[in-house]
Amino acid sequence: MSILLNKLHNKFAFLRRRIEKKLAHDGDALKLFRACHKHDPQQLRQQSIASTRFVVIDTETTGLHAYGGDEIIDIAMIELQGLQATGRVFQSYINPQRPIPAASTVFHHLTDKDVANAPNLREAMPKVLDFIDNAVLVGHHVSFDIRFINKALQQYCHAQLQSPWVDTMLLYLEHRGQIGHYTLEEVARNCAVEITHRHSAEGDARATAAIFAHLVTQLDSAQDTVNRLVKSQYEIRSRL
């Protein structure tokens, strides 16, 4: 097994050097690529929950299809140290460089005018990655948000987020002990969490942070590892 792992490590190192060489002419893209690989996700997973920096993320988009032309228009991140909010928040509107459909505006109330002077995602991405840094990501249906970010990173710098992630919807399934599909409103109501400014990235991220803290307190000790949270999700997903 150790021989196989060494071979995989060497292959990854070779591919990384190859991509860095390819990006050498584009300093901004190279910085994004290196930022994606700055931290070892396996080491992050071995940390205790109490000692881990979490970043709760939420996005609003033009639609539901990351690989069908939809784009991020609002992104927010809330920093937690362990289960405590630190007060650090990142929020930015994003110019999607395409019209926002009226059907989407019904939900998040954002129009083309609201994002006209906002940075595009490539311009905002350095700040996004800087805020994420060494964090474990948290979100409600967080794979949706990660999918949009990874699509952009793949286009910009041939990379993807390496951060471990925790989905509050899957944590909620573990808490209930049964399979189902629950919206943020349903989970918030059952966790006695109030949502303000629903369908704004910051409002939803703040609610998700409170839900995360509540569920982890119910399910785990602060000395349990992040890896236990991550592994339990895969077990739940295998039953979906």
Image (cartoon, rainbow, N blue to C red):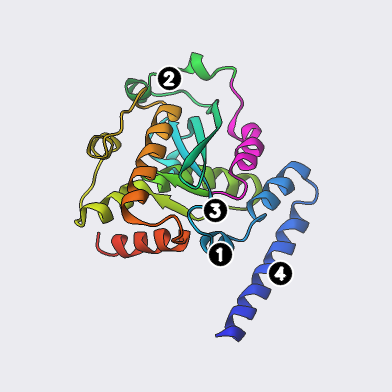
Question: SS for tag 2?
Answer: loop
Q: Which residues are magenta?
A: 118-135
Q: CA distance from mark 1 to mark 2?
A: 38 Å
Indicate the quadrant containing the N terminus: top left, top right, bottom left or bottom right.
Answer: bottom right
Image x and y of residue 42, in percent: 56, 64
Is residue 85 among what the camera can see?
yes
Displayed quadrant of residue 62 = top left
Q: Nearer the viewer, residue 81 or 102?
A: 81
User: Which residue is the extreme one toward the right?
Assistant: 25
Give the left or right position of residue 44, taking residue 195 as reference.
Answer: right
Q: CA distance from mark 3 to mark 2?
A: 37 Å
Image x and y of residue 143, in percent: 42, 48
Q: CA distance from mark 4 to mark 2?
A: 44 Å
Earlier in the chain: of badge 4 and badge 2, it is: 4
Give the left or right position of residue 137, taking residue 178 as reference.
Answer: right
Indicate the quadrant containing the C terminus: top left, top right, bottom left or bottom right.
Answer: bottom left
Q: Which residue is mark 3?
A: 51
Q: CA distance from mark 3 to mark 4?
A: 33 Å
Earlier in the chain: of badge 1 and badge 4, it is: 4
Question: SS for tag 3?
Answer: loop
Earlier in the chain: of badge 3 and badge 4, it is: 4
Earlier in the chain: of badge 3 and badge 1, it is: 1
Question: SS for tag 1?
Answer: helix
Q: Which residue is mark 2?
A: 110
> Which residue type carries mark 4?
Phe
Earlier in the chain: of badge 1 and badge 2, it is: 1
Are the two marked residues, 1 and 4, in contact with CB atoms closer than 8 angstroms? no
Q: Nearer the viewer, residue 217 or 53?
A: 217
Earlier in the chain: of badge 3 and badge 2, it is: 3
Q: Which mark is residue 42?
A: 1
The residue drawn where x is 74% and y is 41% is 28
Q: Which residue is mark 4?
A: 14
